[in-house]
Image: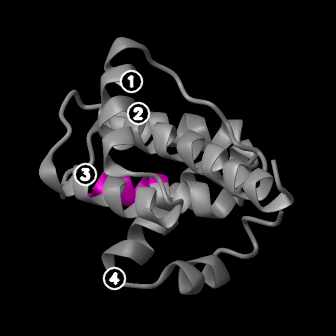
């Protein structure tokens, strides 16, 4: 295995864990609608994960529950994508919100800031701010 193969496989593995978490979020309300599925495919392409692997993951997730924290991915990017997934169907289910906040704690955000972080990300996405603009606005809360 070359060093490039190792790097590519490592990136893909981290991407699959992130995708798994997003899939868990999408299925928290028991439904994976088209907008959520499209968002998952978009994230999968970012990590060069083929659509058929997204479909396999859906079947796998339906059989189990829980999420794996991928510590080497940026914490803010993970929570931003989770919130975006939560909002993909234009409805925030209370189970999705609860899962998102639990996940935020698991990836290391300060417990006392989790509600504010999640609510602020929702607000920033709602008004159309980019991930970078949102990151800047929340810098005081998300120190890595």
Residue 95 locus on image (x, y percent): 34, 31
Which quarter of the image is occupied by the C terminus?
bottom right
Reading the image, the residue beneath label 4 is: 127
Q: Nearer the viewer, mark 1 or mark 4?
A: 1
Q: Is residue 29 left or right of residue 116?
A: left
Q: Which residues are magenta?
A: 82-88
Reading the image, the residue beneath label 2 is: 24
Q: Residue furthest top?
A: 63
Q: Is residue 99 left or right of residue 32?
A: right
Q: Nearer the viewer, mark 2 or mark 1?
A: 1
For the stretch drawn in magenta, what is the main secondary structure? helix
Name the N-terminal-most of marks 3 and 4: 3
Q: Label for residue 36?
A: 3
Name the N-terminal-most of marks 3 and 2: 2
Name the N-terminal-most of marks 2 and 4: 2
Q: How is the image coloured?
A: one colour
Name the N-terminal-most of marks 1 and 4: 1
Residue toward you, 91 or 131? 131
Name the N-terminal-most of marks 2 and 1: 2
Q: Nearer the viewer, mark 3 or mark 4?
A: 3
Task: Residue at 60%, 63% (x, y): give it.
Answer: 77
Q: Nearer the viewer, mark 2 or mark 4?
A: 2
The residue carrying pointer 3 sits among few (fewer than 14), some (14 to 19) or many (20 or more) residues within 10 Å by Cα, namely many
Question: How far is disc 3 from disc 4 in space, using C-alphas?
Answer: 19 Å
Question: How far is disc 1 from disc 4 in space, using C-alphas?
Answer: 32 Å
- Element at label 3: helix
Residue 4 locus on image (x, y percent): 78, 62
Reading the image, the residue beneath label 1 is: 61
Residue 110 locus on image (x, y percent): 76, 48
Q: Is residue 116 visible?
A: no
Dots 3 and 2: beta carbons under 8 Å?
no
């Amino acid at each position: 295995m070359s060093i490039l193969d190792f790097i590519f496989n490592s990136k893909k593995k981290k991407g699959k864990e992130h995708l798994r978490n997003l899939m868990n979020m999408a299925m928290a309300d028991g439904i994976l609608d088209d907008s959520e599925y499209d968002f998952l495919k978009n994230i999968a392409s970012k990590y060069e994960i083929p659509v058929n692997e997204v479909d396999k993951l859906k079947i796998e997730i339906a059989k189990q529950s829980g999420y794996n924290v991928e510590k080497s991915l940026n914490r803010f990017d993970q929570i931003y994508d989770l919130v975006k997934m939560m909002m993909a169907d234009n409805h925030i289910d209370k189970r999705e919100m609860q899962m998102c906040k639990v996940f935020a704690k698991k990836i290391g955000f300060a417990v006392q800031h989790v509600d504010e972080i999640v609510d602020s990300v929702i607000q920033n996405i709602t008004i159309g701010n980019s991930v970078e603009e949102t990151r800047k606005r929340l810098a005081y809360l998300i120190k890595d």
